[in-house]
């Protein structure tokens, strides 16, 4: 059974499912482009590790160390205690708090490399919350992104998360739920932006390589249909649950009616 939504299924953005969806999409893209680029290129699945320790990040579970008031009140050693009096000792029980211990987050991404030289020709990034929310993870990713955009490496950036701030582009007046950026190195500063919304189909886009190469095609609708089926999302997703992140009211009504029409949500 396919997803009831015409494009991106917003229920896959839930924290319980996103990491699995991210990893499955990475593998699906690698599997679909490999036959189109061999033997000149190889596809490598690489891993990046973030350490998140920012206590000011409102999206982080880290908290500042709690500094309690004085728990024991005592007399000064130099103070004379009158005969017959008793020093009062007040004991306050401790409260359990969290300290900002580093949290390691592992994220996978794809690199298309030239077989002969092992040079990275195209980087494929699928954004996760650690990339989009404010804090150390976003800063780290933006530095890598800027490094790629200043190099001869092509960049494909896939953003299938509605929440948090989108990655910067110069024409920042474009608004959409989801977006895919395809930035061939030989066209910079220009790039192709596939901006689409919840009610739209997922796009089909070419993967840039060298100028002389035939560009392989990434068919996202087909890939997602396969992922949805192999992961068993048709029976694992509870379409009666409230969406996380939530939808604007107009889209929420549309999604509810769509799911009720397909008998996947109670009336």
Image: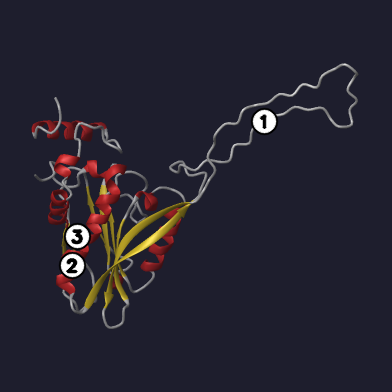
Quadrant in the picture for the N terminus: top left
- Taking the image as shown, residue 51 lies to the left or right of residue 244, namely right
Tell me if I can see residue 175 in this picture: no
Q: Which percent across, then down, holds residue 72?
A: 72, 29
Disc 2 and disc 1: Cα gap in Å? Answer: 61 Å
Mark closer to the chain start, 1 or 3:
3
Residues under numbered marks 1 and 3 in contact, where contact means CB atoms less than 8 Å apart: no
Q: Residues within 10 Å of mark 2 (few under 14, many from 20)?
A: some
**Percent position (x, y) of residue 87?**
80, 22
Specify the label residue 69 is tagged with. 1
Q: Is residue 145 above or below residue 13?
A: below
Q: Which residue is mark 3?
A: 28
Going from the N terminus, do you reach mark 2 or mark 3 first? 3
Depth order, front residue of 112/172: 112
Gap in angstroms between the C-alphas marked 2 and 3: 9 Å
Q: Is residue 100 left or right of residue 10?
A: right
Identify the mark at residue 141; answer none if there is no mark. Answer: none
Of residues 239 and 220, the one nearer the viewer is 239
Question: Where's residue 23, x and y in %?
Answer: 27, 55
Does dot 1 land on a helix, a strand or a loop? loop
Q: Mark 2–mark 1 contact, CB under 8 Å?
A: no
Q: Which of the pair 125/60 is nearer the observer?
A: 60
Q: How many marks?
A: 3
| Residue drawn at the location 39% of the way across and 70% of the way down | 150
**Where on the picture, by quarter, is residue 97?**
top right
Check disc 2 and report its element: helix, strand or loop.
Answer: helix
Q: Residue at x 32, y 72 (%)?
A: 153
In the figure, 146 relative to 160: above or below? below
Residue 106 pos. (x, y %): 38, 56
Marks 1 and 3, how far apart in space?
Answer: 55 Å
Task: Give the number of the mark in front: 2 or 3.
Answer: 3
Q: Which mark is residue 33?
A: 2
């Amino acid at each position: 059974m396919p997803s009831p939504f015409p494009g991106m299924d917003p229920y896959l953005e839930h924290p319980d499912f996103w990491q699995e969806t991210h990893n499955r999409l990475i593998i699906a893209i690698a599997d679909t482009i490999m036959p189109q680029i061999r033997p000149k290129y190889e596809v490598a699945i690489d891993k990046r590790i973030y350490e998140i320790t920012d206590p000011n990040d409102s999206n982080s579970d880290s908290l500042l160390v709690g500094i309690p008031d004085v728990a024991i009140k005592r007399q000064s050693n130099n103070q004379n205690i009158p005969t017959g009096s008793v020093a009062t000792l007040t004991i306050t029980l401790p409260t359990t708090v969290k300290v900002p211990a580093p949290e390691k987050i592992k994220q996978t991404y794809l690199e298309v490399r030239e077989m002969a030289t092992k040079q990275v020709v195209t980087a494929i990034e699928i954004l996760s919350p650690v990339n989009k929310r404010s804090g150390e993870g976003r800063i780290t990713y933006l530095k890598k992104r800027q490094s790629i955009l200043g190099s001869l490496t092509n960049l494909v950036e896939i953003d299938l998360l509605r929440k948090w701030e989108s990655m910067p582009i110069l024409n920042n007046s474009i608004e959409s739920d989801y977006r895919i950026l395809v930035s061939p190195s030989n066209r910079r500063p220009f790039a192709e932006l596939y901006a689409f919304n919840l009610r739209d189909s997922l796009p089909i886009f070419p993967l840039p390589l060298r100028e002389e190469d035939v560009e392989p095609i990434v068919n996202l609708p087909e890939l997602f249909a396969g992922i949805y089926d192999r992961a068993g999302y048709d029976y694992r997703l509870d379409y009666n649950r409230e969406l996380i992140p939530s939808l604007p009211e107009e889209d929420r009504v549309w999604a509810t009616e769509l799911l009720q029409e397909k008998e996947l949500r109670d009336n």
